[in-house]
Amino acid sequence: MSGEKSENLPADEQQKMLQEFLELQKQDIAVKQKELESRKDEIQSHERIALATIEAQKQGEQQHGEIFKEVHKRRLNAVIAISFLIAAVLITALWRDKDSVAIEIVKIGGAVALGYFAGINRGKAQTLEKQRREKDSD
């Protein structure tokens, strides 16, 4: 039916309608091209944000690792220093024939060391138990 109507229109009207149709098609293509460019920019923006987030996470984890390593290193240095101090006192006591003082230092030091290691293991056990409870509740 629409084919019959266009046949009935004069040639200049058909030409004008064809020109309008082509112009609308060009505008439609231009709009779609702008939409594609906008979408491309949006995707690139999301990509930049994701990369920045990943980089920030890496830096955060790296800083956390460095801090943990530094704390552990200082703790180890403190334990070594205390151990050397106790060893020096023991050697001095034994050298001066003060065996009873050396034995008392060993008793006290042993009790302190056992308490320290028991406390560390208890803390680890509590942490593991808490994690297990959280995991079970999820």
Image (spheres, helix red, strand yellow):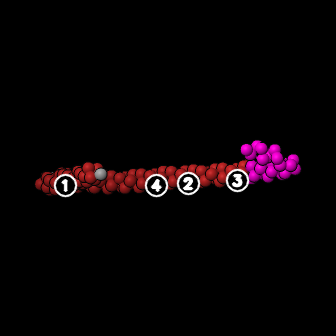
Secondary structure, mark 3, is helix
x and y percentages locating residue 13 in the rendered image: 84, 51
Q: Residue furthest left?
A: 100
Q: CA distance from mark 1 to mark 2?
A: 49 Å
Residue at point 73% right, 44% down? 1
Closer to the eye: label 3 or 4: 3
Residue pointed to by mark 1? 115
Q: Amino acid at mark 3?
A: Val
Q: CA distance from mark 3 to mark 2?
A: 27 Å
Badge 1: few (under 14), some or many (20 or more) residues near its Cα, within 10 Å? few
Mark sitting earlier along the chain (1/3):
3
Mark sitting earlier along the chain (4/1):
4
Residue pointed to by mark 3? 31
Q: Amino acid at mark 1?
A: Gly
Towards the viewer: 45 or 83? 45
Secondary structure, mark 1, is helix
Res 63 quadrant in image: bottom left
Asked if the residues shown at circle 3 and circle 2 are in contact, with their CB atoms under 8 angstroms apart, the answer is no
Task: Using the rendered image of the protein, determine whether residue 5 is visible from the camera's viewpoint.
Answer: yes
Residue at point 28% right, 50% down? 135
User: Which range is magenta?
Assistant: 1-27
Mark sitting earlier along the chain (3/4):
3
Q: CA distance from mark 4 to mark 1?
A: 34 Å
Residue pointed to by mark 4? 60
Asked if the residues shown at circle 4 and circle 2 are in contact, with their CB atoms under 8 angstroms apart, the answer is no
Q: Amino acid at mark 4?
A: Gly
Badge 3: few (under 14), some or many (20 or more) residues near its Cα, within 10 Å? few
x and y percentages locating residue 32 in the rendered image: 68, 50
x and y percentages locating residue 104 in the rendered image: 14, 55
